[in-house]
Image (cartoon, rainbow, N blue to C red):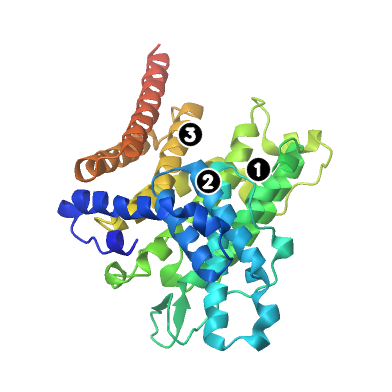
């Protein structure tokens, strides 16, 4: 991982990326010894590192296995209850264990929501505190505009990971699959409020929907901040897309549908009545974030490009629902922008997974363009 993270020049990324794969293959070759050996922090960190690397290759099954194994080993050494043993640990070791736990937790929730997998870590079993807000080593901190305080990006990502878990549990778990529409709408309204509270707690210059500060391109925290922004927009799409897809009865608005269900009480959060526009806006904002992608860092790009793909699919679906939407031409251009970015990745670092993504993106674009042309023909007649 250290080898590939040192790649700064996109023109030499391909050979260096291939070299880094030799190292990760050596690591995977030692997987049996890591899994069956004595449980310790080194084993957990090794498995987290391999998961992080493979997550950038869009590999669902091995990622789920690796992070699940890491969490199981962490459970054997009490990582999820680190603070219960705080009196026996010095502050530096205590903070290290917290960080390792929360990194594994964040990856677990990412995989769960991204691939629709059951999380390996249950919230009911977790008693460890969040990482320290202002750590002595300043890891994860970025300066705020007023210069008097710092913002802990890593801690904020951990808080957002908890919300991701709530989104999966209340909307995508087996128990939530067949719930009535009113219950889904109520869950989305509650989760949307939780997500907005998370956003409001962030300094204004680092909130999603804002331009990232110019100082950040040289900061190692840029990847974390991008992940936080992408995850925020993805949560909006994951939540509100369910309402859009279930709003299938033509000629009847959402309020009427809720009235036909078991609970006639409308949700307090009015955002659920704007689900389609919220999804579209979040998708556009996700694609705009691509300009901040760190050039040459194929691992981080591989992890984040998933969100641009979700955004492209969301925009394509929106055009299919309403091919006469005023923003349809602009949205097709955004989908094409993702396709162009992915094609440039193939030139610098050939990858079968990226080639498939280009094909998917081209399909989203062509389907949207066909829907627009068909709508224009019908309008002319």
Residue at image position (52%, 85%) is 92
Tell whether 193 sits left or right of 155: right
> Label 3: few (<14), some or many (≥20) within 10 Å?
many
Q: What is the quadrant of residue 336 in the picture?
A: top left
For marks 1 and 3, give the CA distance. Answer: 21 Å
Tell whether 165 sits left or right of 311: right
- Residue at the extreme right: 262
User: Residue 131 appears at what percent x and percent y?
Assistant: 55, 76
Q: Which mark is residue 13?
A: none
Residue at image position (38%, 31%) is 360
Name the one closer to the observer, 75 or 210.
75
Q: Which mark is residue 172?
A: 1
Q: From the viewer's perspective, is the residue at label 1 or at label 3 nearer?
A: 1
Residue at image position (46%, 47%) is 281
Residue under numbered circle 3: 318
Rendered position, 189 above or below 133: above
Residue under numbered circle 2: 114
Q: Which is more N-terminal, label 3 or label 1?
A: 1
Rendered position, 45 above or below 248: below
């Amino acid at each position: 991982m250290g080898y590939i993270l040192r790649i700064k020049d996109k023109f030499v990324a391909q050979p260096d990326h291939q070299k880094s794969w030799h190292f990760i293959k050596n690591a995977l070759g030692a997987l049996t010894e890591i899994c069956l050996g004595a449980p310790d922090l080194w084993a957990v960190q090794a498995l987290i590192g391999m998961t992080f690397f493979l997550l950038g290759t869009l590999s669902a099954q091995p990622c789920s296995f690796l992070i699940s194994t890491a969490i199981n080993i962490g459970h054997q050494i009490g990582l999820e209850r680190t603070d219960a043993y705080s009196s026996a640990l010095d502050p530096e070791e205590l903070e290290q264990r917290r960080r390792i736990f929360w990194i594994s937790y964040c990856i677990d929730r990412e995989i769960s929501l991204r691939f629709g997998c059951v999380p390996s870590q249950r919230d009911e079993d977790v008693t460890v505190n969040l990482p320290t807000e202002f750590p002595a080593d300043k890891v994860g901190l970025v300066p705020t505009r007023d210069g008097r305080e710092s913002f802990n990006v890593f801690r904020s990502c951990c808080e957002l990971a908890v919300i991701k878990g709530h989104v999966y549990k209340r909307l995508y778990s087996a128990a939530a699959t067949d719930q009535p529409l009113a219950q889904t709408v109520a869950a989305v309204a509650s989760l949307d409020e939780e997500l907005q509270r998370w956003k409001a707690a962030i300094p204004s210059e680092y909130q999603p929907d804002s331009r990232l500060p110019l100082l950040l391109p040289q900061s190692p925290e840029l990847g974390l901040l991008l992940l936080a922004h992408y995850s925020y927009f993805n949560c909006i799409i994951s939540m509100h897309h369910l309402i859009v897809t279930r709003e299938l009865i033509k000629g009847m608005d959402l309020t009427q549908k809720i009235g036909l269900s078991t609970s006639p009480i409308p949700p307090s959060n009015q955002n659920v009545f704007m689900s389609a526009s919220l999804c579209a806006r979040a998708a556009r904002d996700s694609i705009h974030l691509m300009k901040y992608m760190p050039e040459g860092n194929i691992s981080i790009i591989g992890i984040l490009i998933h969100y641009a793909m979700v955004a492209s699919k969301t925009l394509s679906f929106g055009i299919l629902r309403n091919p006469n939407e005023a923003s349809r031409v602009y949205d097709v251009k955004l989908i094409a922008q993702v396709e162009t970015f992915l094609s440039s990745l193939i030139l610098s670092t050939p990858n079968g997974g990226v080639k498939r993504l280009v094909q998917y993106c081209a399909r989203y674009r062509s389907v949207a363009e066909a829907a627009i042309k068909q709508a224009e023909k019908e309008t002319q007649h």
